[in-house]
Amino acid sequence: MPELPEVETVKETLKTKIIGEKIVAVDVFYESMIDEESRNYFKELLIGESVTDILRYGKYLFFIFNNVSIISHLRMEGKYFIKDIFEPRNIHEHIVFTFESGKTLRYHDTRKFGTMKLVKTTDLFEIMSEPELKKLGPEANSPLIDINDFHSKISKMRIKLKTALLDQTLIAGLGNIYVDEVCYLSNLHPEYPCNYLTLHDSKTILDNAKYVLEGAIKAGGTTIRSYTSSLGVTGRFQLKLHVHTKVGCPCEKCSSPIKKIVVGGRGTYLCDNCQKMNKPLVVGITGGIGCGKSSVSKYLISLGYTVIDTDVISKEVASTSGFIESIKIVFGDEFIENGTLNRKKMGELIFNDKDANKKLNSLIHPIIKKKVIEEINNCNQKIVFVDVPLLYESGFDDLCHKVICVYANIDINIDRLMNRDNLTLDEAMVRINSQMDIEIKKQKAHFIIDNSLDLCYTYNQVDKVINKLLEMRK
């Protein structure tokens, strides 16, 4: 079935061959392909019209003439052929446009599923207002697609991921082949429930959709089974497919055999080792500095839950030679002592200099985030917790389905911080004020835990949150 890259290839090829051609005759051999409303004037209005442009949106082609336009959808096996006027008609050529030059443009469709609609306008805005086009979502490879809008829509859909990505009202242009490829590159099972997708998942899906479609367009599409270019162009993207049609072949990532299943009636290819179905519910733990996140994390660990501690990962990253070299380049040698990062000196800098803080975060956060994602993907539990002090500030909230904010009364918070880090009151306030206001974090979070009193009260609140999370994960 021709998908966005194949339709784009058809469009670009036709533009080199029929722009400027004038129609002198139209023969319709299968009238049902033409929209019922425009059947009566389809031939009449096209005679004498010249092709001025050919456009595409999603899987639709728009033939623009002087005064009218045709909206064409190739469906399963539609193709366009350009042939000499004297060449005999194939029985599957159902609509033939004859040009003044002696060329003919022939619509070939074995299954007769394709459609054409004549509209009395050449204005793209008016064309896109037609009922079948108005409901289409943004194109999957559009640089203007709104990630937050996409995530808001897909995460509310209680259906399988592949089914959602094939829905052209959500996102236009992805078909069976490319959805398989996008799911694989995103490490997401095609049957994964959409309402469990994180914002990071949605971003990854869109990034890979753009990557796959752009690659396929450059390769001229995918020549596979029912789709072959009828215009002298052979698609080469089938040479770059990772899973689609690769059943039994070793996965490029893990060497497990590629499998074929059926999702929504469509043959679907995947690596069920890399694309795990039962990914955990990811719960972020954040709060103000010195509020007691570590107490909550330790309690969760005592209950048998996995807690990914980004502070631990940060220290591991900060000890690597590559990171040390980056610190030298960005901040200078004075922040390195005996080959390691002088954390105290760096802390004094970043808590007092916002620009320095941003520079450090830009160096370390992407590395930490990558390691967190790896640990999440390797976790086999129903719920995994991620302890991130600067969860919102660093954008780690896009990895989380839910967020817990731990806070304490400000006086208790200050006292704990001063005692823990041996700080003066002024030093403690500088650290507290360097982070996002705790009230804002509380408003953003899904669960709030007050850690102002004895730990038994804190643990009781944690137990209640766990019960709610387990209910959600059933």
Image (tube, rainbow, N blue to C red):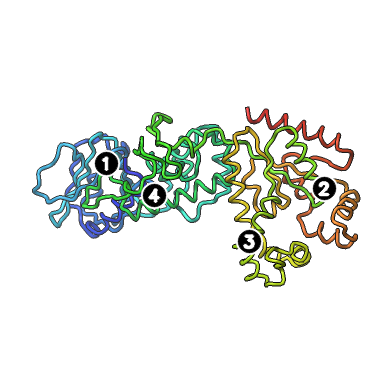
Indicate the position of residue 242 as horizontal and vertical percent values. Answer: 39, 44
Q: Which residue: 71% across, 53% down?
A: 390
Residue 134 in sight: no
State yes or no: discs 2 and 3 in contact (Cβ < 8 Å).
Answer: no
Q: CA distance from mark 4 to mark 2?
A: 52 Å
Q: Name above or below for residue 69 compared with residue 112.
A: below
Residue 460 image-quadrant placement: top right
Q: What residue sits right under mark 2 in the picture?
A: 291
Q: What residue sits right under mark 3 in the picture?
A: 362
Please tell me whether mark 1 sits on a helix, a strand or a loop.
loop
Quadrant into which the N terminus falls? top left
Q: CA distance from mark 1 to mark 4?
A: 16 Å
Pointer 1 or 4: first along the chain: 4
Q: What residue sits right under mark 1 in the picture?
A: 78
Given this view, does label 4 or label 2 mark the residue nearer the observer? Answer: 2
Pointer 3 or 4: first along the chain: 4
Q: Residues within 10 Å of mark 2 (few under 14, many from 20)?
A: many
Left-right relation of 323 to 304: left
Tell me the kind of residue under disc 3.
Ser
Residue 347 in sight: yes
Tell me the kind of residue under disc 4.
Tyr
Q: Residues within 10 Å of mark 3 (few under 14, many from 20)?
A: few
Pointer 2 or 3: first along the chain: 2
Please tell me whether mark 3 sits on a helix, a strand or a loop.
helix
Residue 333 image-quadrant placement: bottom right
Pointer 4 or 2: first along the chain: 4
Q: Residues within 10 Å of mark 1 (few under 14, many from 20)?
A: many
| Mark number displayed over residue 57 | 4
Please tell me whether mark 2 sits on a helix, a strand or a loop.
loop
Given this view, does label 3 or label 4 mark the residue nearer the observer? Answer: 3
State yes or no: discs 4 and 2 in contact (Cβ < 8 Å).
Answer: no
Q: CA distance from mark 3 to mark 4?
A: 37 Å
